[in-house]
Image: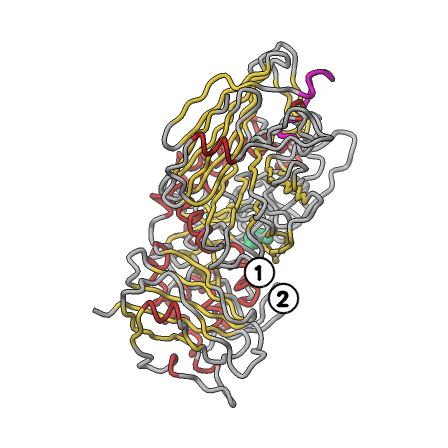
Amino acid sequence: MNVWYRLHGARSSIVIKSCQHGLPEVVYWGKTLKSVSDDELAGLTDAVLTAGYLDQFPVLSIIPELGAGFHGEAGLEGHRQRQHWAPRFQVTAVETSDRELVFDARDEVAQLMLTIKVTMDTETDVVGFRSSLTNTADSEFLLHRLGNTVSLPAYADELLTFHGHWAREFVTGRQRWPANRVVKENRKGRTSSDAFPGIVAGTPGFSEQSGEVYGLHLAASGNHRLVAEKAVQGGRYIQAGEWLYPGEVALAKDESYSTPWLYGSWSGDGLSQMSLQFHRFLKKRLRLDVATQPRKVHFNSWEALYFSHEPKALLKLVDQAAAIGVERFILDDGWFRGRNDDTAGLGDWYVDERKHPGGLQYLIDAVNQKGMEFGLWFEPEMVNPDSDLYRAHPDWVLKLDGYDQVLGRNQMVLDLSRPEVFDYLYERIDSLLSQYRIDYIKWDMNRDLVQPGSAGVASVHRQVEALYRLMASINDAHPTVEIESCSSGGARIDFEILRYTQRVWASDCIDPVERQRLQQAYSIFFSNEIMGSHVSVEKAHTTGRSTNLMFRLMTSLYGHMGLELALDSLSADDETTVRQLLKYYKDNRTFFHTGDWIRVDTPESYLLCNGVVSTDKRRASFTIAALDRCDYLMPGRLRLTGLDPEKRYSLTAIHDPYAHHGQLRPNRTLAADAGIYSGDALMKIGIQLPVIDVASAIIYDLNVVE
Ligand code: GLA
């Protein structure tokens, strides 16, 4: 007998069917469906048994079973000494509530127990899937894969995927859902910048404000495997789980393995609404005591000084940073013993007394006296072979005996699952946080894993679990310290690392042209208040492109803003501009970081638009950036979104007066009295945009007038 379970959010519902033979299946996920009866569900979804196929239809369940004749991507793969490799489960118990369904299932032959959880966050409409497998037999069960699978309707026929690399994260690709499988695998041992664990499927041509879309994100910071396939039975599915090395997970009697959470957000109004739901969900999960503080303006020493930490130069920077409006001063890489370049020192987390005689107190005092907080860079998981730590404990690294470890940025990876390594790192970080007043940690992780063996066994899953434990212990011991997740820029950004961290470094690339594109794609899953966004020098260090200061500042404005440049490089006029924009950020950050961050479809592809609308819709700010020249004399009108059609808004533009020259003239929207317009007109007619220079932007500020 089939039983139908429903979970409802504010805008969407998910319906799960559980049958006597087979595991539960997502039969509907979409617009709120409150009144449908079991009989209707059964009648409308009755499968067609075609000739030339099995006599019993295999269920496209959350863990599809090879043993039940599902010949696509099995949700569970593994064996017990070459036996029990095609299990088949029966649901034995179901627990339900308004927010959660828990299905317990058993395979008495293979002696395995499976628990499948489906959740609905009723405030944000984000659904979650998580499964756990328990071995109940005396002998070990070797697990190859446990992946949660979401069946999607056939009209979701277009996919949006993510790729990229260092300093070019969150590149998106669009394709019609092909007949063949789309597989994105990550074996790098960190979330990665080339195979971000997220995917969107939607009706063809979906855009920011149109189409029905399903976004899925695997909250995992290690390896993963993501599969999108058209099932031979019709319909289609996306499966996501950890990618496991051979032998990586072996379950002894009564041991369990749980998948990472797979989170999903559905929208019938395009991508931006889907993202907004993810943002709201994420905001609820963050450690609020830290993450909801006003996001302080950072100064980061990296691109200003790199490894040359001269106290005199640092103290000068402290003065300059404070004078310009910085609120938190971060000492990046280079402060610890032996760290003069990237060939040595990682692992020796003791202040380098040659650079900082007597320790860091002099610097922290100077920072605090200027009313700023102090932050420090760490890369705890790493060790350079040229370090005291490695010389003393060459066996502490992840490796396979008999091979030379492949280095990455001249470093190896410490085996965090070893208690002595964990304790050493905890002691070092804890004692520095206890000795000094440190308000923020930039927690970096700068290499991909190769042969990550612990006592010969593959150890990415255990490594990542130990990392979470280490971060959680630091969180517990130092609850007011904010942690940023950095990994060669944005290679470790996911919902799970964000349980322990409150800021992410989206990319080492702070060229604003790149950042405009990157931030749009980043925002598909992640919110703005946690996104470190820094202003660099005119000629970007990672691309060599020169851009004007105003564009750099405007590009950083909605995120967690900061400066990362030699402050000497600023002219007196530039300094004034920076000071003004930092003040503007401070005056408006509560609105920027508590409002809804949205992306807006633009009339021309060379223009990108994103903005913030306050939750009461009384205030809005939209940034329009031009990344190229217009093909026409003027661009089409930009239809705003998210406003209250009944309210009237005053329109004010912030722009760079130097970004308009020659024959290009501003239009009325840039005038001091740009006018008062109804939300309805702004969203239906739109704004005629002026033509602006390449690599420049306009910010439209809208305020309700009574
Ligand atoms: C990584 C980070 C940078 C910087 C350097 C320091 O590349 O992404 O921001 O901290 O490490 O070595």
In the displayed structure, 480 sits above or below 594; it is above
Residue 213 on image: x %, y %: 51, 50
Span of residues in magenta:
74-86
SS for callout 2:
loop
Q: Quadrant of the C terminus?
A: bottom left
Characterize the magenta stretch by its predominant secondary structure: loop
Report whether 10 appears left or right of 500. left
* Residue that carries the numbered disc 2 in the rendered image: 543
Q: How many other residues sit within 10 Å of disc 2, few (<14), some (14-19) or many (≥20)?
A: few
Q: Is residue 692 magenta?
A: no
Q: Nearer the viewer, residue 591 or 18?
A: 18
Q: How many other residues sit within 10 Å of disc 1, few (<14), some (14-19) or many (≥20)?
A: many
Residue 641 on image: x %, y %: 40, 63
Q: Residue at x 56, y 68 (%)?
A: 513
Residue 240 on image: x %, y %: 59, 37
* Disc 1: residue Cβ within 8 A of ligand 1's nearest atom: no
Quarter assignment of residue 384: top right
Give the amino acid at mark 2.
Thr
Q: Is residue 79 magenta?
A: yes
Callout 2–callout 1 Cβ contact below 8 Å: yes
Res 387 visible: no
SS for callout 1:
loop
Q: Residue at x 40, y 34 (%)?
A: 476
Give the amino acid at mark 1.
Cys
Whole-number angstrom distance, CA of label 2 to CA of label 1? 8 Å
First along the sequence among labels 2 and 1: 1
Residue 486 on image: x %, y %: 53, 49
* Residue that carries the numbered disc 1 in the rendered image: 509
Res 628 visible: yes
Q: Nearer the viewer, residue 57 or 393?
A: 57
